[in-house]
Amino acid sequence: MNRLVKILLGFLLVLSFTTTSYARDQIKIVGSSTVYPYATVVAEKFGKGGKFKTPVIESTGTGGGMKLFCAGVGANHPDITNASRAIKTKEKALCEKNGVAEIIEIVIGNDGISFAHSVNAPDADFTKEQLWRALASKVDIDGKLVENPYKNWSDIDASLPNKKIEILVAPPTSGTRDAWNSLVMVNLFMMLKVKKLKKNVLKLEKMDTLLKLVKMTL
């Protein structure tokens, strides 16, 4: 079974498809809602440009697409999964468990994350650390890791607006959210741990454990 996965690291896309023919005569694609609009355009052009039918595409989110893709092989399973992040180790293990072997990841493009606010609000020049402190479930204060006490932006830094911290983010199944967690939340935490926290305060190595420190306000 030769399956191809196309992915983007960090803010990327993931596609996977099989070269094995099944009972159905259409390519089936699932995955990232971010990639969905672009994949749809490509699928339509593919359908119009040759003898093959237009692929069927379903927007399931990156995580949902990986679960469907790694569930097995055959006509009842997708041939391609789009993703806005790299495939996780536990997802590779699930694929292997269900006979989805020889997965190849191919980077298709790069995605980006932007922050937006009301046009009526004053501009604020946030640093990554300030954003981390607004979102993390636990933060370092005086060398200790404590529950996040910040309610307003000005609690984090007096130069920031005296406004309640309210942030809308992508759902847990989103690959973009996964990318934000790994590239910003975890990286910033590890940097702060090395710089400010004593070694005996926290001993965390696994990504899943680190991500438990991430709080998202929906």
Image (tube, helix red, strand yellow):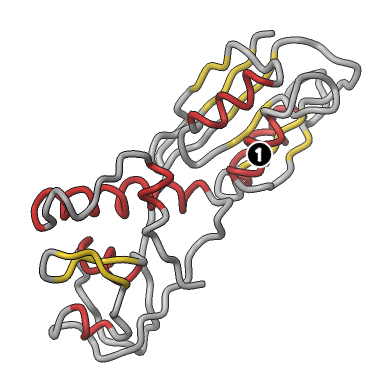
Rendered view: 151 above or below 62: below
Choose between 2 and 25: the one closer to the eye: 2
Question: For the point 29% across and 80% down, which residue is it?
Answer: 150
Where does the image place residue 135, in percent across and percent down from the top left? 35, 67
Quarter occupied by residue 51: top right
Q: Quadrant of residue 3?
A: top right
Q: Residues within 10 Å of mark 1 (few under 14, many from 20)?
A: many
**Residue that mark 1 sits on:** 65
Query: Hey, which quadrant is residue 68 in on the image?
Result: top right
Vertical relation: 114 (above or below) 8: below
Q: Position of residue 69 (x, y in %)?
A: 68, 30
Q: Amino acid at mark 1?
A: Gly
Return the x and y of residue 70 as percentages of the image width and height.
67, 28
Instruction: Work out whether 148 lies above or below 58.
Output: below
Q: Residue at x 30, y 49 (%)?
A: 186
Viewer-proximal residue among 212 and 188: 212
